[in-house]
Image (spheres, grey):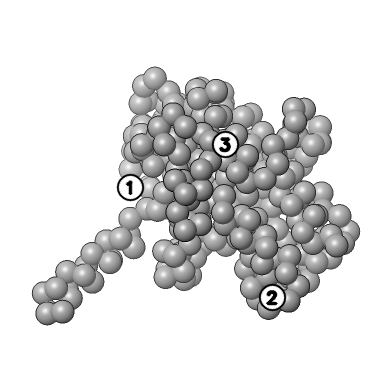
Amino acid sequence: MNLPSRLFAASFALVLLMLPAPGAHAWSTLGHRLVGELAQRHLTPTAATEVEKLLAGEPNPSLGGVASWADALRNTDPARFRQTSPWHYVNFPLGECDYQPERDCPNGQCVVAQIDHQRAILGDRKQPLAARRDALKFLVHLVGDVHQPLHAGNRPDKGGNGFQVSLRTDLKPEAYARKDYRNGVAGTNLHSVWDYYILGSRKFDGDFATVTPYANSLDPQPWPPMTDAAPSGPEAWAGESCRFVDEHGLYPSGHKLDSVYLDKYRPLAEQRVRRAAYRLAQLLNETLGQ
C-alpha cells in the first residue's frame, strides 16, 4: 500500500471510530443501572453468591455497578468496542418483527444471539473466571438493551438515530451533546430521547448514589412486572420491543417535543426497565443457581 493509500485508510478508520454506533448507549447510565440494581434484589441466594464471587475486585461489585461497562468500552478499549458494538441491537426489516437469524443476525452479531452466547459462557464453570466475569457484565447490559424498544426496531433510521427532533427540556444533555443545547432546546434524535431524556427528566441524573431511590420507587410495584404471559428468551424479547414501537406510537407526528412527550412515555419506559430487570434476574437465577 502506498503512502497516500495508507493515509486514507488511517483517516477512514478514525472517522469510523468517531461515528456513533447504533444502540451504543441504550438507556444511558441511569437506565442500565436501574435494570442491574432491580435484578440484584431478586436473585436467589445461590445466584447472588456467585455474582459476588464473579464481580469481586470491580470498582462497584454489583449488577448495577457493572451495567454500563459494555458502553464504557468505547473509551476504555476502543478496539473491543468496535468489535462488540453490533451486539447491542437487532434491526428488523420494515414492517417485520419476527426474528430470523440468517436475515437479522448474520454471524451471530446482534443482541439476540449474544445474550444466548454470553449466557453459555457464564454458565460454563470450566471457563476462566475472567471470561465468565465479562460474560456476566455483557449480559447485564444486553438484557437492558433488548428491552429498549428502539434497539429492536424495524424502520430504516438506525433505531431512531435518524429521526431528528428538537426537544425543549431543562435536563442538560450528556457532555458529548451539549454543543447542540441552546436556550433550553436540545437538538437530538428519537433514540437519544429514549436513551437518556425520558428517564433522566424524572430528576435523577444517573449518578450511582441517585439510582437507589429511583429503584425503590419502581420496586414496590407488583412483581413480576407483567400480568400477561411473559415471552421467554431474547428472541421473544426483541420481537416484543419491536411491536412496542408501533403499539404505543413512539414516533411522534412532528419533530418538536417537550415535557409532554417525556411525561407521557416515562411510565412505559419504566415498565420496560422493570421487565428487563425481572427477566435478567430469572436468567441469572437459572444460569447461576445450580
Amino acid type of the residue tagged 2 in the rendering = Gln
For label 1, the residue is 179
Please determine whether, in this image, residue 118 is positioned above or below residue 251.
below
Amino acid type of the residue tagged 1 in the rendering = Lys
Tag 1 and tag 2, C-beta contact below 8 Å: no
Where, quadrant-wise, is the C terminus in this rendering?
A: bottom right
For label 2, the residue is 127
The residue lying toward the viewer, choosing from 235 and 285, is: 235
Q: Which residue is found at the position 47% from the left and 58% from the top?
A: 107
Q: Please indicate, yes or no, whether residue 191 appears anywhere in the rendered image.
A: no
Q: Position of residue 106 (x, y in %)?
A: 45, 54
Cα–Cα gap, marks 3 and 2: 31 Å
162 left or right of 136?
left
Q: Residue furthest right?
A: 45
Q: Earlier in the sequence, mark 3 or mark 2?
A: 2
For label 3, the residue is 239
